[in-house]
Image: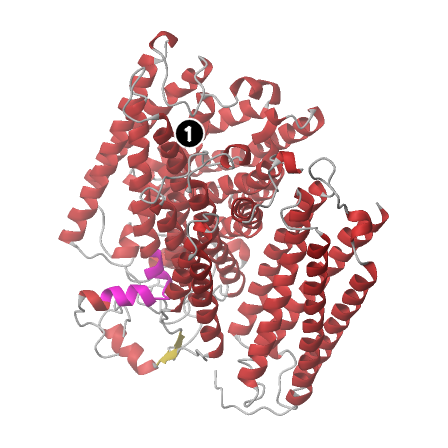
């Protein structure tokens, strides 16, 4: 692979993320990693459902009435929008429009940071209400499930930022195209997990 | 590159192995470290058998005995059997599919070092305040009550080594999907490659639940979470489910590669194409599939209810069907073959009755009402040692003899190999056959002693004597390794003379780029086809001689794993109020981990090229260089 090879939108391959053997390997390998991640979150969801509202007798906090639904709804919209903006970024990556890609990735990161900030605010708020990690089995399951997702968001953001800074001066090539593509794929996965969290944890919590 | 053949100093060799990304060297690392852990686990087994040699023995205290059985099981499964099999996969699978390396050489190295540091971490528990003592299954109700740091060593050590195994699994899957030589269709892949493929898929889907369970365990102990604390609303059965959702596929992660090794051996030494290749492939896939649907047969006595027990009992019995298909295919492969009873073949032939015995007791336990009688008795101990030792360990010993020349370029002594076999085989049956009857006589597992009036003395004494024979067998194997290494008689491409698959078509050990030219695969047992057609060049090639792209070595995997190792000490002592430095250690460790990850992702690593001229120069010298710079 030649890093100095200059591409134009005309010479740029249709699928730059799988144009090289390394890219193909990363593509398959990353989908497999997402399979493992899916099982990880499935285990966390199953545990959450088993421990939902379980705690010592007379415990104060259960899923009904605790959650701040308007806030969580706003978070959901922000994260879904960030998934859309990352699609735009990859669209421009495929058109070999580096600047537009960086711009849309920047917006994605911005939305992700807002999401993460709101999540930290939300956790902080619950803790101040007295709903701490060690309160009950329910609290442990809740914070571990949602917190693991939050950790994934943090990792995804760091990944985007590292990629943007590292490649800011040199543009797109078939060496870094798979990296951008996979980071965006990871971001979509995080988004899908959040949709399940919103449904299973927050909405099902509110109606119980 | 001209200095390839020069002698290197010890420091250079160590540095070479610390930074290597070559699948063949990583295989050797797996084999050596797995072998050392196998010896440690074996030593623990011997101490257990000495303690149980006679009634009322006080060789080991009750607490130490608990630590011993826990560490024996954990070490043998996670640190010995699996890594050694991963070593064979690394050594052989890329060669079998005609690849130059695995898909992610860097991750291959990372996987090894994570396993290595995880194993070291777990074993440090012996010297740092006590080993885990809640059994290898580490049931939460028992584990949370354990006062020493043993359980933390278990949870953190297995987390680290589990990440390593998961990375290895993904790597093998991608390698097999993307890097097969031209003509190597899925249905032309050797059986060992197929079993590697399915076992890797099982690793991919089975290890995350274990990791989640281990994290719950760590959080319960470290941060005071309440996943398993019943009075706080927790549920200890969650651990059992997560553990066995991992634990049962784990059995197949171990046995499928063993099946693969035996399939190769039966075909090679019967000098016949495998009987029912297609059926063997589909049986492998079916076993992998059903492997995820039977975990609750470990929990029949928990009280999940008759419906759950019936479903899982039925699913368990079904698994015996594809396994039976395999047994018959192997028998029919031998039948009518021109058989050579070499050491690997003798192991393979001995494996069939041994493993069938373990399989049959497995079906007995699948009958849930009967399992209420057998549960937690020595019958269970006998059963799983029959499948693990009679299946996996025999395959490992057979594989060591079969692939030693391919990995090291010299043959283990057949005579000493036979001595090892007979000691080990007789010792194995002597140790474990009688334990079925101990179980039926009512001896529970995991008891550190028994009374003279219980009538278990004689059978336990016989069992301990058998263990001694197995130990002698292993010592003879070590002697064999030393003698072979000292003699160092070099062998050619196909030392068994009847090799059928691609790994036997290139020098032993292979040059670091494996195939100078990518071979063209023309059918199942492709090298055999070329031999039968009298192809003097060895293989038909799919490409002219040209430049070869190779990955660079890297020390980063070692440093990353070391970072996790350091962080684990912070996590381990976090719950001790007397140690204020724990948070700092945790942060430093994680900083090393993520810092080196960042360096890896920011620094371009494009590898290097071996030019055609260098390649031709190398081929003139026999193509047998190890490629270190």
The region drawn magenta spans B13-27
User: B200 above or below B618?
Assistant: above
The chain to which mark 1 is attached is: B
Image quadrant containing the N terminus of chain B:
bottom left
User: Which color scheme is applied?
Assistant: secondary structure
Of all residues shown, which one is farthest toward the top?
B453
Q: Is residue B64 left or right of residue A181?
A: left
How far across and down, in percent of the image, does residue B410 sit? 22, 54
Task: State the residue in front, B616 or B514.
Answer: B514
- Residue A2 visible (yes or no): yes
How far across and down, in percent of the image, does residue B136 sit? 45, 36
Under tag 1, what secondary structure? Answer: helix
Q: Which residue is mark 1?
A: B386
Q: Is residue A175 left or right of residue A83?
A: left
Q: Is residue B514 left or right of residue A12?
A: left
User: A120 above or below B28?
Assistant: below
What secondary structure is the stretch in magenta mostly built from? helix
In this rendering, the count of numbered labels is 1
- How many residues crowd mark 1 within 10 Å: few (<14), some (14–19), many (20+)? many
Q: Quadrant of residue B477?
A: top left
User: B362 above or below B543?
Assistant: above
Task: State the residue in front, B50 or B9.
Answer: B50
Task: State the residue in front, B617 or A5.
Answer: A5
How far across and down, in percent of the image, does residue A185 sit? 65, 69
Residue sitting at x 21%, y 47%: B481
- Residue B527 visible (yes or no): no
Q: Can residue B176 be found in the magenta stretch?
A: no
Image quadrant containing the C terminus of chain B:
bottom left
How far across and down, in percent of the image, does residue A104 sit? 70, 82
Q: Quadrant of residue B289?
A: top right
Task: State the residue in front, B170 or B264.
Answer: B170
């Amino acid at each position: 692979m030649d890093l100095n090879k200059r591409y134009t939108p005309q010479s740029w391959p249709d699928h730059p993320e799988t144009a090289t053997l390394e890219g193909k390997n990363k593509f398959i390998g990353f989908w497999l990693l997402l399979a493992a991640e899916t099982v990880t979150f499935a285990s966390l969801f199953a545990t959450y459902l088993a421990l939902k509202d379980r705690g010592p007798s007379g415990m104060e906090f259960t899923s009904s009435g605790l959650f701040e639904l308007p806030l969580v709804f706003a978070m959901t919209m922000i994260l879904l929008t960030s998934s859309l903006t990352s699609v735009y970024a990859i669209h421009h990556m495929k058109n070999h429009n580096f600047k537009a890609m960086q711009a849309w990735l920047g917006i994605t990161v911005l939305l992700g940071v807002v999401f993460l900030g709101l999540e930290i605010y939300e956790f902080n708020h619950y803790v101040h209400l007295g709903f701490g990690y060690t309160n009950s089995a329910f609290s442990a399951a809740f914070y571990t499930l949602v917190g693991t997702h939050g950790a994934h968001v943090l990792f995804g953001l760091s990944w985007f930022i590292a990629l943007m800074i590292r490649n800011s001066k040199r543009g797109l090539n078939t060496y870094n195209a798979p990296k951008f593509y996979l980071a965006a794929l990871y971001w979509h996965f995080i988004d899908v997990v959040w949709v399940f969290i919103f449904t299973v944890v927050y909405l099902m919590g509110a109606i119980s | 590159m001209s200095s390839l053949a020069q002698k290197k100093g010890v420091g250079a060799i160590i540095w070479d192995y610390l930074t290597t990304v070559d699948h063949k060297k990583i295989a050797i690392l797996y084999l050596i470290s797995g072998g050392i852990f196998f010896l440690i686990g074996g030593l623990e087994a011997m101490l257990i058998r000495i303690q149980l040699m006679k009634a009322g023995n006080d060789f080991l205290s009750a607490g130490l005995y608990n630590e011993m059985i826990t560490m024996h099981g954990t070490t043998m499964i996670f640190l010995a059997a699996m890594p050694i099999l991963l070593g064979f996969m690394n050594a052989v699978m890329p060669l079998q599919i005609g690849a130059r390396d695995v898909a992610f050489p860097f991750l291959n190295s990372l996987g090894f070092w994570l396993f290595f540091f995880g194993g070291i971490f777990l074993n440090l528990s012996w010297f740092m305040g006590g080993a885990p003592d809640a059994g290898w299954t580490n049931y939460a109700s028992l584990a949370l009550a354990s006062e020493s740091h043993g359980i933390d060593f278990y949870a953190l050590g297995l987390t680290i080594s589990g990440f390593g195994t998961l990375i290895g699994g993904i790597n093998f899957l991608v390698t097999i999907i993307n890097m097969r030589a031209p003509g190597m269709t899925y249905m032309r892949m050797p059986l060992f490659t197929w079993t590697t493929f399915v076992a890797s898929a099982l690793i991919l889907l089975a290890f995350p639940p274990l990791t989640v369970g281990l994290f719950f365990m760590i959080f319960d102990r470290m941060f005071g979470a309440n996943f398993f604390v019943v009075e706080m609303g927790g549920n200890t059965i969650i651990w059992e489910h997560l553990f066995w959702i991992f634990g049962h596929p784990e059995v197949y992660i171990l046995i499928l590669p063993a099946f693969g090794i035996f399939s190769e051996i039966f075909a090679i030494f019967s000098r016949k194409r495998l009987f029912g290749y297609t059926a063997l492939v589909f049986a492998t896939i079916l076993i992998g599939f059903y492997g995820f649907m039977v975990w609750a047969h470990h929990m029949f006595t928990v009280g999940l209810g008759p419906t759950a027990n019936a479903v899982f009992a039925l699913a368990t019995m079904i698994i015996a069907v594809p396994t039976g298909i395999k047994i018959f295919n192997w028998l029919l492969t031998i039948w009518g073959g021109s058989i050579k009873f070499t050491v690997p073949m003798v192991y393979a032939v001995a494996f069939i009755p041994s493993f069938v015995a373990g399989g049959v007791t497995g079906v007995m336990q699948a009958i849930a009402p009967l399992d209420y009688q057998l549960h937690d008795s020595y019958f269970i101990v006998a059963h799983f040692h029959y499948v693990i030792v009679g299946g996996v360990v025999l395959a490992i010993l057979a594989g060591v003899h079969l692939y030693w020349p391919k990995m090291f370029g010299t043959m283990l002594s057949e005579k000493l190999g036979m001595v090892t076999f007979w000691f080990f085989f007789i010792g194995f049956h002597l140790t474990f056959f009688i334990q079925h009857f101990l179980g039926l006589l009512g001896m529970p597992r995991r008891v550190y002693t028994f009374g003279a009036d219980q009538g278990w003395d004689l059978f336990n004494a016989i069992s301990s004597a058998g263990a001694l024979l197995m130990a002698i067998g292993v010592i003879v194997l070590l002697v064999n390794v030393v003698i072979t290494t000292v003699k160092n008689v070099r062998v050619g491409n196909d030392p068994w003379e009847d090799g059928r698959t691609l790994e036997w078509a290139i020098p032993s050990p292979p040059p670091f780029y494996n195939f100078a030219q990518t071979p063209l695969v023309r059918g199942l047992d492709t090298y055999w086809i070329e031999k039968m057609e009298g192809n003097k060049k060895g293989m038909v090639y799919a490409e002219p001689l040209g430049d070869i792209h190779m990955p660079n070595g890297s020390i980063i995997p070692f440093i990353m794993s070391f970072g996790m190792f350091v962080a684990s000490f912070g996590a381990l002592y976090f719950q001790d109020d007397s140690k204020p430095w724990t948070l700092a250690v945790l942060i430093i460790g994680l900083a090393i981990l993520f810092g080196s990850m960042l360096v890896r992702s920011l620094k371009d690593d494009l590898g290097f090229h071996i030019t055609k001229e260098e390649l031709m120069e190398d081929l003139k010298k026999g193509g047998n260089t190890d490629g270190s710079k």
